[in-house]
Amino acid sequence: MSSQVSSPPLDVEMAGITKTFGSVVACDDVSLTLRQGRIHGILGENGAGKSTLMKILSGLYLPDAGNITIAGSAQHIDSPNTARQLGIAMVHQHFSLVPALKVWENVLLGDTGPLREKLARKKITEVSQHYSLDINPDAKVETLPVGVRQRVEIIKCLVHDPRIVILDEPTSVLSPAESDSLFKVLRQVVSQGNHCVALVSHKLNEILTATDDITIMRQGKVVTQLATSRADAAMLAEAMVGRKVNLPLALPEDRIYHGTADAPNENAAKPPTPPAKSPILSIQAAKACDTNGAVLLDSLNFDIYPGEITAIAGVEGNGQSAIDQLLSSLLRLDSGKVEVDGKTVKTGKPGAFEQAGVAVVSEDRHDSGCVMDMSLAENLFLANPQEARRGGLLQPKVMSARAQQMIEDFSITASGPQALMWSLSGGNQQRVVLARSLTSQPKVLIASQPTRGLDVGAVEYFLDRLKIAAEAGLAVLFISHELEEILHVADRILVLYAGRIIGEMPGQDVDMRRLGLLMGGIDEVPHSGVTHGATSGAAAR
Amino acid sequence: MNQSLRNSSDWFAGFLKDTPSFLKHTLYDKWLVTGLYVVSIFSALAVSALLIWATDGSWRSVFSAMLDGSLSNPGRWGATIGESTPLLLVALGTIISVRAGLINIGQEGQLLIGAAVTTFIAVRIDHPGPLILTLALLGGLLAGALWAWIAAGLKYWRRVPEVLTTLLLVTVAAQLVGYSLKTTTLLLDRSPDHANRNQVSDKIPANIRIPRLTIFGNEFPLSALVAMALAVVLAIWLVRTATGFRLRMLGMNQKVAHRVGVSAVKYGMAAMAVSGGLAGLAGAMMITGGDFGSYTFTAGFSSFIGWEGLLVALVARNHPLAAIPMAFIFGSLRTGSGFLAATGVEREISNVVQALIVLALLLPPAVLYARERRKLLATVKART
C-alpha cells in the first residue's frame, strides 16, 4: 500500500461469493482479502467451503454471486486459463503429476505451444536454486518419494511465476520436517516477490506458524477473520467446530426411545471403565503405507467393545480410508495386528475379516460395497451364496424371497428383487449394503462414512439403525467426517490424526474445545491418561 | 465412479462383461433391439452385395453359393455343424475367462497345442480303442489348460497383463507345433513315402476317432453334442452355483469379491485353466472328429478357429447358450465360403461378409449399452 511503484498493491478481494451445488450451499456470502506479501490461512473442517472458495478463485468453478477484484480491477475468472493469465496458480491437495513422466515433462504439462525442453530445464534449475528446492529434472516422478513429489508440484506452480499462489492442504502427505521446509519456501515466496499466498488447511499448528492472516470458515460461512498474531490454538479450534452443534446431543431419553437396552445404566458405567469388558475388535500398533510410501496408519491402536458405538472423528485423509480398507481385508499391514474376538486375523487375505465376523458398510459403495451390475437380490448374497442353495443349485426364488423381506424390513425403494443395483438411488444402495451387513450376524459392524451423499431423511434412518444395532449388543465402529453425526450417535469418541488415535473421550458432554484441538492435531495434555491407558492396555496383551 | 465410467478402456471391458440386460428390459427395449438387429444385418448384407458388385461379381450367385455350401445342399448341415463345434468350444472358453474378468485371446495357440498333444497320444501310443481316444482328448484338454496357465501364472506372479501373454503365446505355440511337425520323434509322419514331404503327422488310426452320427443324411461327429452339452452346463453353472456366482462377482467387482473372500488368484487361475482347456479340447476334437485335415495334423491345422471363436463369444455377449446359434452362423459362413470358387468371386469375400456380420451383430447391444450407460451416468450425476 505504501509502495509508490506504478502498479497498485496486488491485493485479491473476494466479496460476497456464493456458490450452491443443488441444495447445498458450499459458500454463502463469503468475503476475504488476500494481501500482497502475506500468507493467508483458510481454516475449516471438511465441507466448510474452503476448497470451493479457492476453486472459484482459480477458475475451476464459477460463483453464483459475488465479485473478485485483483489489484483494484474487477476480474471475471471463468476458466483456469483466465486464472493463469492473471497469475493465479494452485497446488492441489491431490497430486496432479503423471508418474511415468520425468520432472521437467511434468512441469511442462498443461503448457501450450512447442515443447521447449531446454527452457523448461533452465527454469526448473532457476526456481529450485532460488528457493533451495533440490530437484533432479530428469528423475521420473514415480521414483520420487512423496515429499519430493510435493516439491515438484510447487516448482510446477512457481515456474510460471505466479503472483497469487493457492495451496490446498499441501501438507496432507508430508512429514513435519517436510512441511516446515515447505513453509520456509512459502515465506520466501511472499517476502521476495510481490506475491500473495493462500494456504488452505485444517491443521491448527501450521495455520498458526505459517500464516499472517486467518479466515475461519464453517458451513460455507466466514466465522472469524483475524491476524495470526492475535490467535491461539484453542480459539481457532473453538471457532472451527465451536457452536456448530445445534443438534441436541444424543440424550439418554433418545436412546431409551428405541427399546430394551437400558441406556442410563450403560452411560453411567461406560466411559470410565471400558477395559472391564473384553474388546471384540482390537487393532494393535498397526502400521501401513501406500504404494508411494506415504504413511496411512502410524501405530494405530484402538479397541471396540460390544454394545456400544465407537466413533472415529477426524478430518478427512487422516487414515479413515485405510481403517475401512484394513477391516475390509483390502489393506495389508506392514506391522502390527488386528484381533477379532481374541483371534488374530490375517490382514489383506481375501475374505479374512468377513469370515471373522466383521461386516463393513464401506466408504465407497460403488467401489467396494456392492456389485452394481448384479441384482439387488444377488447383492444380498454376495458373502454367502450357498445360503440360497437347495438341492445343489442356487434358487433364484429363495434369493428373491429374502430380498423381498429385506426390501420391506429396510424400506428399500426398488422396482423389485431383480432390479439391478445401479438402478437404485444412492440411499437405497446403501440400505442394501446395510441390510446385507446386518443380516450376516456380524460380531462387529464398521460403518465408514455411511451417510456420504445421502439426504437428510436417509441419514437419520441410517444413524437410527446403527443405534438399534448397538443396543442389541453389536459392536459398532462409526467413522465419519461429520461431527454432528458423531455427536449424535457415539458412546465413545476417538480422534484420528495422521494415522493414529491422538485422543479419546466419552460421547456425552463432549468438550468441544478439546475435540477441535485434537482434530487440528494438538493434544493439549500431551500424554493424557486415556490415550496412554489405551496404549499400555494394548501392549500388556 | 464417474471417472471410471468415462474411462474408455473400462467402457470396453464393461461392454465385454455386461450381461445382455436387454433380456430383462421393457417391451419397448425389446422392439428396439429386434429392430436394430434387422436393420444392421440387412445393412451388412447390402454392403456385402455392393462390394461383390464392385468387384465384378454377381451378388445373387455369391449368396446362393454360400447358402448351398452351408445349408441348402444335401448333407451340408452336417458339415456346418462339424465346423461350428470347435468354434463353440473356443467361445465357451472365452466366455468363462471374460466372466472372471480375464481376457484370454490366445485360444488359437491353446487349440494348436491341444491338437498337437492329442495327435501325439493318438498316433504314438500303440494301444487300441476308446481308452486311447479318451486319453488323447484329456491330453489335449490338459495341454490347452497348461498353455493358458503360463499366461495366468505370469499375471499373478509378475503382473504381466494376460491380454499380451496369451496373444504372444500363440506365436510360440505355432513355432513349437511347426518344430514338432519337422521332427520324426515328435509328430512328423514316419512312413517312408511321406518322409521329408510336407509337414504332416501320421493319420489318426481309425479306432481312435470320434464316432460320427448321421441324421437325415447330415453327418457330423459326436463331439458336437458334447460341445452343446458343455454350453448348457456352463450356463447353469454360471448362474445357479455358488462358485459360478463368485466367479461372476470377481469379474464384475474385484474389490467386493476380495472382501467377501473370493481369491482373485484362485478363481482366476481356475478360469484360465478351464478357458485354455476348452480351447485345447476344441483342438483335440477337431483332429479326432474328422472335419479338419482329414485326421492328419498339419501346420495350418487350426484354420483360424481360435480367432473366430473369440468373435463368437463377442457376438453372443458372453452367454453360453447364445453361443450355440452364433457358432452355427459362423460355421455356415465357413462352409458357405467353400462353394464360392464356382462363382468366380474371390474366396476372401466371405471374410468381408463375416466381418460385416460381426459388426452387425455387435451394433445393437453396443447401442443399448451406451444407452444404459448414459442413464446410469445421469442417475449418478443426479445423486452427487
Image (spheres, coloured by chain):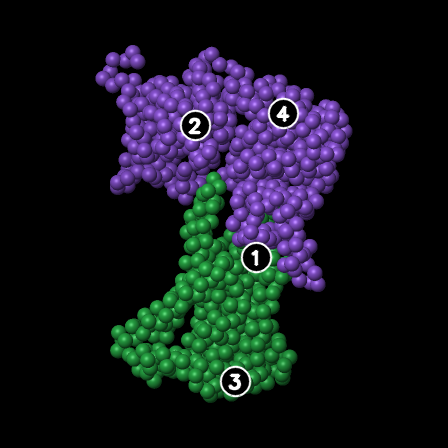
Q: CA distance from mark 1 to mark 2?
A: 44 Å
Q: Disc 3 designates what residue?
A: B219
The residue drawn where x is 41% and y is 58% is: B367
* Quadrant of the image occupied by residue A483: top right
Could you say which is closer to the camera, residue A521 or residue A139? A521
Q: How far apart are the two marked residues, 4 and 1, measured between alpha carbons?
A: 45 Å
Question: Same subunit under labels 3 and 2?
Answer: no
Whether label 1 touches label 2, CB < 8 Å: no
Q: Report in which chain the residue with disc 1 lies.
A: B
Q: Percent from the top left, x then y, of residue A237?
A: 53, 20
Which residue was labeled with disc 2?
A27
The answer to whether any part of residue B357 appears in the image is yes
Of residues B57 and A255, the one drawn nearer to the viewer in this rendering: A255
The secondary structure type at the circle numbered 2 is: strand
| Badge 4 or badge 2: first in the primary sequence | 2
Q: Chain of mark 2?
A: A
Q: Amino acid at mark 3?
A: Glu
* Residue at point 37%, 30% (across, down): A63
Are the residues flagged by discs 4 and 2 in contact, CB closer than 8 Å? no
Q: Are both tags, 1 and 3, on one chain?
A: yes
Q: Residues within 10 Å of mark 2 (few under 14, many from 20)?
A: many
- Mark 4 vs mark 3, CA separation in Å: 82 Å
Which residue has dot 4 on it?
Answer: A249
* x then y, percent, for residue A53: 41, 28
Chain of the residue on which disc 4 is drawn: A
The label shown at residue A7 is none
- Visual hue assigned to chain A: purple
Type of amino acid at the residue the image marks with label 2: Cys
Colour assigned to chain B in the rendering is green
Q: Residues within 10 Å of mark 4 (few under 14, many from 20)?
A: some
Mark 1 — residue? B248
